[in-house]
Amino acid sequence: MSDVILLDCWASPFCMRVKIALEEKGIKYEDRAEDLFGGKSELLLTSNPIYRKVPVLLHNGKPLCESSIIVGYIDETWASPPLLPSCPYGRAQAKFWVDFIDKKLFDAGGNIWKTKGEEQAVAVKDFIEIIKQLEGGLGDKDYFGGDSFGFVDIIAIAITSWFNAFERCGNFKVEDYTPKFSAWIKRCLQRETVAKVIPDPEKVYEFVLFLKKMNGIE
């Protein structure tokens, strides 16, 4: 049995975060796909009895849950290369943006594909405002932490894997409103550690269409 096991779902941006962090650290791991619709494994249910969802990282048999917490654990356990800035202020700023992204971004995107008409128009407007705020946090830097790809970039870039689906459902383009943020997305996708993890946008879009149908949203 591997020392590091990831209970995974290919379409989950939260699982993608963990995989990118492991790739950045050069950590070999065993990827175990979970069937979230046909029946979750006993290992998942016992490893994450509170939320019963992926990702779960098992390190030497000990389970860790919640993607941002897992990425933090990976960064502390395998120190090189560091994902957080060395100074306390830089680390605090990074954690602020991680918290912001966790609370806002994916749910705002979800509101786009879960709605129609005027309600969807409001959802698109709200989503764009969040991206504009993120673009403000990025500023003129290559990455959120400066010159180096790091913690905040991992947390955010995984969720952008669903942007194509959000855009097509809401009939808009992120690039039209936030060109610097869009350039950051393209920059991150050029990294091997990111490119090998992020799935085909068309597959994600088809997955979202499946979710819409499953939830009776036409």
Image (tube, helix red, strand yellow):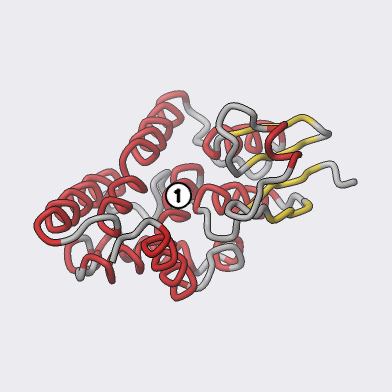
Residue extending furthest left?
Answer: 118
- Which quarter of the rendering shows the C terminus? bottom left
| Mark 1: few/some/many CA within 10 Å (<14, 14-19, 20+) | many
The residue singled out by tag 1 in the image is: 153
Corner quadrant of residue 52:
top right
* Residue type, mark 1 in image: Asp
Q: Nearer the viewer, residue 145 or 171?
A: 171
> Is 91 displayed left or right of 171 in the figure?
right
The number of callouts visible is 1
- Point 58% across, 50% down: residue: 15
| Mark 1 residue element | helix
Q: Position of residue 46 (x, y in %)?
A: 72, 31
Q: Nearer the viewer, residue 62 or 188?
A: 62
Corner quadrant of residue 71:
top right
Q: Position of residue 94 (x, y in %)?
A: 42, 35
- Point 44% across, 51% down: residue: 147
> Is 7 displayed left or right of 17 in the figure?
right
